[in-house]
Image (tube, rainbow, N blue to C red):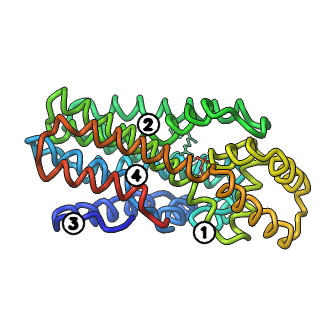
Amino acid sequence: LPPVRATDDEHLLLELVEQRIREVASSAPPPVGDAALHLITAGGKRVRPMVLLHAAGVGPLRNGNVVDLAAAAELVHNASLLHDDVIDEANLRRGRPTSRTVWGNAHSVLAGDHLMAAALELLEASVVPGVLRSMLATMRRLVAAEVVQLAHRGKLLPDIERYEQVIRGKTAALFSGCADAGARAGGADEEICRALTGYGEEAGMAFQLFDDLLDLSGTPDELGKSMFNDIAQGVATLPVVLAAQRRPELAHEIMEAARTSDSSSRDLEAIVDSVRHWVEATGAADETRALAHLHIERALTSLVSLGDRAERRQLEALAMAMINRSN
Ligand code: FPP
Ligand code: MG
């Protein structure tokens, strides 16, 4: 993310979050701790903790341990990724081999379980009312989205409504949950809590849409493998779905390449070029970008009830950073 003008306080809090999640990951018995650390040290953006910390700044209170809450949110996220990579049989994440390819599926699942248990412990120990219950509801939404995604596996081009339903559950839910936890920690009143969770939900939608665009800008080798992996698993992102709807030959080409798993890297490169070209040429990229912008506008609108204050400007800058980034 491009630098959101964070105060020294926020830098310090993020540094403490970082320490906390590494401490938690390394407390698992080896090699599960290594499997967890492998993902946690791979360079995540920590955008969920940022949402939580910024939301916590809105209310009048400063006495909840926001570091532990923000760490818990990032731990839930990383736990879900460790499990997701097993479900998706993914070999690459954040440009590195996935934990499951290094330590195996079993250790990866256990690493996710360890992080999730630790996250729940941190929430349970929190003095902030309702944060555990709220995060449990968020986790249910994550699971439900993953179930929908699984149910539609193999249908190479899911409908757009389904795509939106899935990204709402798998990404927007946790962003909204982070805003909710932050709002609670700051002691915000009910109306402000609603405004902040609405912000989180909409910013999360935009984040995922933009992520799906960025996914198309990796190296052909990385991109080729992960794209075909997703498509072979029946998971296609909005830009690819739109491009393929508008150019059926592209859909055919992608499916053919995904089917022949021994595609040489030259084949991969050619098809990646073709997908990139048609995602732009059919207007699929512009439409995805426009949809991301629409969700950001809604996120900003949700903040109107906060009035004119520094915390609102920080949340606005954070939302804008979600759709102006290069990784
Ligand atoms: C990544 O999606 C997946 C998620 C953001 C959520 C996965 C959720 C679960 C496995 C549910 C259970 C987890 C918990 C902790 C309750 P993706 O596969 O589309 O994106 P990717 O390309 O980053 O893998
Ligand atoms: Mg995945």
The N terminus sits in image quarter: bottom left
Numbered label attached to residue 95: 1
**SS class, disc 2:** helix
Q: Which label number is shown at residue 173?
A: 2
Q: Nearer the viewer, residue 198 or 129?
A: 198
User: Does label 4 or label 1 sit earlier along the sequence?
Assistant: 4
In front of the other: label 4 or label 1?
1
**What label does residue 74 carry, if any?**
4
Work out how far the residue at label 4 is from the one at label 3, CA to CA, in angstroms: 16 Å
Q: Mark 4 belongs to which amino acid?
A: Glu
- Tell me the distance, in whole angstroms, between the alpha carbons under discs 3 and 2: 26 Å
Q: Which residue shows up at 48% across the image and 67% down it?
A: 326
* Residues at circles 3 and 2 in contact by the CB criterion of under 8 Å: no
The residue sitting at 31% across, 68% down in the picture is: 3
Q: Is residue 324 above or below residue 63?
A: below
Q: Earlier in the sequence, mark 2 or mark 4?
A: 4
The x, y position of residue 38, in whole percent, is 54, 66
* Three-letter amino acid code at the position of disc 3: Leu
- Label 2 Cα crowd, 10 Å radius (few <14 / some 14-19 / many 20+): many
CA gap, disc 4 and disc 1: 19 Å
Give the labeled residue for mark 3. Answer: 12
| Mark 1: amino acid | Gly
